[in-house]
């Protein structure tokens, strides 16, 4: 079976909730599909295919009064569920406008973040809510937005970069984090988990200076889940830090990276801007190397995945293959990742 670039029947991070204002529409491309987002009268998010079914004009280019979207071309109106409510030019009032519908994507707000379900078959949405991601945060608590960038690469390259342990020393060299001169042999234990795998909870590396400022017994667990989400959960005494990086394919050449953050420390609100600056700096270091990668890939070179440092990349491809296979055959997904200890030097 040829591996698909895009995985469907899964939830994708769309945006932080602060970008979806009441009474406003936001247009996005996700997996090559044009989608328009908004909030209904109750403040709940919705997502519709961004085309008027009449002549195809993007609905996002029309008008939205907080209740209905009106197409800018012929004035057709649609409610939040995508059902047509008005056709101004139609003289025959007997026509049932409700038969005309724009596809309504499942869309949910979790801890202040907006997620959208991209189905393989738009007539089969059963079970979508059972696949909502676990963001590790109690209801009512919200993530802070850190940064959003567009990576000039397809989702496979973006994910491999996200879970690659060997690049950290060279791409993220900083006096406050770690140096290429202080390499250490690492041993990390991995287990299959859900739609991915986790690096089991452990004490942070001693050559990662950023952790040293945290007071109290510190441990971290890093978890990767399809379609492209990396969760880091840090315990510091009775407190926790949750750092999540989400990769959402825009199309075959671009992938959007969003980073969100939560910490239970009360003092974080006073240090938020310096912390956000550091987070943005890390992300833009990755963006810089991906721009170089884009240049290199123009010649379509032969690539390789080598040894234990690249084991997670190989797991990712196998996870994708098994998910695709399970959806095509209508069978339960079987996680192919083994329980394994990996070694590398960073």
Image (cartoon, rainbow, N blue to C red):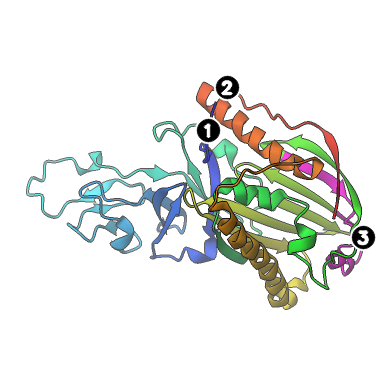
Q: Please determine whether, in this image, residue 8 is positioned above or below residue 36.
A: above
Q: Classify mark 2: residues with Cα within 10 Å, few (<14), some (14-19) or many (20+).
A: few
Query: Which range of residues does the magenta coloring cover?
Result: 197-219
Q: Visible in this render: residue 144?
A: no
- Foreground tag (3 vs 2): 3
Which class describes the residues within 10 Å of circle 3: few (<14), some (14-19), or many (20+)?
few
Residue 244: image x %, image y %?
A: 68, 55
> Which quadrant is the C terminus positioned in?
bottom right
From mark 1 to mark 3, how far is it between C-alphas? 43 Å
Where does label 2 land, which residue? 331
Residue 266 horizontal/vertical position (percent): 77, 70
Q: Is residue 271 left or right of residue 143?
A: right
On-image quarter of the N terminus: top right
The answer to which of 6 and 326 lies nearer the viewer is 6
Task: Indicate which disc, 1 or 2, sits on the residue closer to the N terminus.
Answer: 1
Labels 3 and 2: the sequence-earlier one: 3
- The residue drawn where x is 85% and y is 66% is 179
Q: How crowded is mark 1: few (under 14 residues within 10 Å), some or many (20 or more)?
A: few
1 or 3: tag closer to the N-terminus = 1
The residue located at (17%, 51%) in the rendering is 87
**Could you say whether the residue bearing mark 2 is in a helix, strand or loop?**
loop
Q: Can residue 66 be seen in this view?
A: yes
Q: Please report the residue visible at 78 percent of the width from the left and 53 percent of the height from the top.
A: 166
**Residue that badge 3 annotates:** 206
Q: Please give the residue where the numbered disc 1 appears in the rendered image.
A: 127
102 on left or right of 127: left
């Amino acid at each position: 079976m040829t591996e698909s670039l895009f995985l469907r029947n899964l939830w994708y991070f769309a945006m932080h909730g602060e970008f979806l204002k009441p009474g406003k529409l936001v247009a996005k491309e996700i997996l090559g599909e044009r989608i328009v987002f908004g909030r209904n009268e109750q403040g709940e998010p919705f997502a519709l295919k961004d085309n008027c079914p009449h002549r195809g004009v993007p609905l996002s280019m029309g008008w939205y009064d907080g209740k209905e979207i009106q197409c800018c071309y012929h004035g057709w109106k649609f409610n939040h569920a995508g059902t047509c409510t008005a056709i101004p030019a139609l003289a025959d009032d007997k026509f049932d406008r409700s038969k005309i519908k724009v596809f309504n994507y499942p869309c949910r707000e979790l801890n202040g973040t907006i997620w959208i379900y991209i189905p393989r078959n738009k007539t089969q949405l059963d079970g979508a809510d059972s696949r909502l991601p676990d963001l590790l945060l109690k209801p009512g608590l919200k993530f802070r937005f850190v940064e959003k960038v567009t990576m000039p690469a397809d989702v496979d390259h973006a994910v491999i970069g996200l879970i690659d342990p060997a690049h950290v020393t060279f791409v993220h060299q900083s006096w406050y984090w770690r140096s290429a001169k202080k390499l250490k042999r690492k041993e990390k234990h991995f287990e299959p988990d859900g739609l991915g795998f986790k690096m089991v909870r452990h004490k942070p590396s001693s050559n990662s200076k950023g952790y040293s400022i945290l007071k109290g017994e510190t441990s971290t667990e890093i978890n990767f889940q399809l379609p492209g989400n990396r969760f880091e959960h840090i315990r510091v005494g009775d407190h926790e830090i949750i750092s999540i990086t989400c990769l959402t394919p825009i199309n075959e050449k671009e992938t959007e990276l969003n980073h969100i953050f939560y910490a239970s420390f009360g003092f974080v609100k006073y240090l938020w801007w310096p912390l956000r600056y550091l987070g943005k700096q890390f992300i833009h270091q990755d963006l810089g190397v991906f721009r170089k990668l884009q240049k290199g890939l123009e010649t379509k070179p032969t690539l390789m995945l080598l040894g234990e440092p690249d084991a997670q990349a190989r797991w990712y491809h196998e996870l994708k293959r098994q998910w695709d296979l399970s959806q095509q055959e209508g069978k339960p997904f079987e996680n192919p990742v083994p329980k394994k200890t990996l070694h590398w030097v960073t």
